[in-house]
Image (spheres, grey):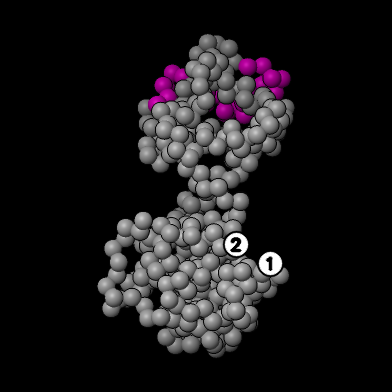
């Protein structure tokens, strides 16, 4: 349930005509959510056949137009194009006179704040950065997922209430992000979500190689519990051989990865080092055990001949159980989306 205080009616934006430039996975979903709030989508631009199909599915009867025509018809324009395409798009629209004074121009890039819209601001537009922290599939389910979704919001102070009101009307939760913190904010989301997809996909591949018939079914409860514990307890939720200082087990892991998935070794070692550092900092990893562990990781997993340290301090992982469950209630906190990018909120079509 949306618990954000509702804006005073006088601060809510009037019913607006809405246009979308870039009919990727994000733009049509946001426009459809605004339509449910009483706004009126009037134009959408899209290049690929897939973007046109998405627009037809989520915004039926809304005509396809060029970006310049979208701006001519809409009072609120959503710029939902890839991050790298956004600055050039804004400059081009401003230089060709497509931007109208008083027009609300909102982009959905996580990387950029409102300053990327400065060329449009100089032409009289009202700049907003509204980034949904959500993965998108390009289907109607995305509109439902916006309920309770956090949006990273950046705008001139005088437009803050209007920006936050638009987010609330889409069912989201506005979170104010300072202009100079946008890249850090976006990096944090990419680290937590985009890289998670890579880790899970690698884990499933390795389980299949190990003979597990349904890796998704095996990982689902474990990952759900690990995510729930991490969100509740932070670093205190760390478990597994790295947090315990089991250098021998970690070395054995890396030997197996070298044999069966050498492309995964660098990622495993990097994450193990980061985990060891955090476990040390929070008193979970004993310093006397960390020495051997960090030595194994510094060597990239130990000798290339496959020999494993057996001095008794690292030992084998005999603690039992599945690493990561530590006191979990089994809650499945996984998103379940189909690997779409979404965190940058910008899989639209660049023009």
Q: Residue at x 47, y 82 (%)?
A: 17
Q: Is residue 165 visible?
A: yes
Real-space Cα separation, disc 2 to disc 1, in angstroms:
9 Å
Q: Residue 76, percent across and down? A: 47, 79
Residue 177 visible, this angle: no
Is the residue marked by circle 1 packed among few (<14), some (14-19), or many (20+) residues within 10 Å? some
What is the quadrant of residue 169 in the picture?
bottom left
Residue 126 falls inside the magenta stretch: no
In this view of the protein, which residue sits in the foreground, 93 or 331? 331
Q: Which residue is mark 1?
A: 50
Q: Quadrant of the C terminus?
A: bottom right
Residue 89 sits in quarter: bottom right
- Left/right of residue 116 with respect to residue 207 in the rendered view: left
Residue 213 sits above or below residue 25 on the image: above
Instruction: Mark 2 or mark 1: name the one nearer the start of the chain.
Output: 1
Question: Which residues, given as a range, are shown in magenta?
Answer: 284-308
Q: Which residue is mark 2?
A: 138
Q: Check whether the beta carbons of the residues at disc 2 and disc 1 lie within 8 A of each other.
A: yes
């Amino acid at each position: 349930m949306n618990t954000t205080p509702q804006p005073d009616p006088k601060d809510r934006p009037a019913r607006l005509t809405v246009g979308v430039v870039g009919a990727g996975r994000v733009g049509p979903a946001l426009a459809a959510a605004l339509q449910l709030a009483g706004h009126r989508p009037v134009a959408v631009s899209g290049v690929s056949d897939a973007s046109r199909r998405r627009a037809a599915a989520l915004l039926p009867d809304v005509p396809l137009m060029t970006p310049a025509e979208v701006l001519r018809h809409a009072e609120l324009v959503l710029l939902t194009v890839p991050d790298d395409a956004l600055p050039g798009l804004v400059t081009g629209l401003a230089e060709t006179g497509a931007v109208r004074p008083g027009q609300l121009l909102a982009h959905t890039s996580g990387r950029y704040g409102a300053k990327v819209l400065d060329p449009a601001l100089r032409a009289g537009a009202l700049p907003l950065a509204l980034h949904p922290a959500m993965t998108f599939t390009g289907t109607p389910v995305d509109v439902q997922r916006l309920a309770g979704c956090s949006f990273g919001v950046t705008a001139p102070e005088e437009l803050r209430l209007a920006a936050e009101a638009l987010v609330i009307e889409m069912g989201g939760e506005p979170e104010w992000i300072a202009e100079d913190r946008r890249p850090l904010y976006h990096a944090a989301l990419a680290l937590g979500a985009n890289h998670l997809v890579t880790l899970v996909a690698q884990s499933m591949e390795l389980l299949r190689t190990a003979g597990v018939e349904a890796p998704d079914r095996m990982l689902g409860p474990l990952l759900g519990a690990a995510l729930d514990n991490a969100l509740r307890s932070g670093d205190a939720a760390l478990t597994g051989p790295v947090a315990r200082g089991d250098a021998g087990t970690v070395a054995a892991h890396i030997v197996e990865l070298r044999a069966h998935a050498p492309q995964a070794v660098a990622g495993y070692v990097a994450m193990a080092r980061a985990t060891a550092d955090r476990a040390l900092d929070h008193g979970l990893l004993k310093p006397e055990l960390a020495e051997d562990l960090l030595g194994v990781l510094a060597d990239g997993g130990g000798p290339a001949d496959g020999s494993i340290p057996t001095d008794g301090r690292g030992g084998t992982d005999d603690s039992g159980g599945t690493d990561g469950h530590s006191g979990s209630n089994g809650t499945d906190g996984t998103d379940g989306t189909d690997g779409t990018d979404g965190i940058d909120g910008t899989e639209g079509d660049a023009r």
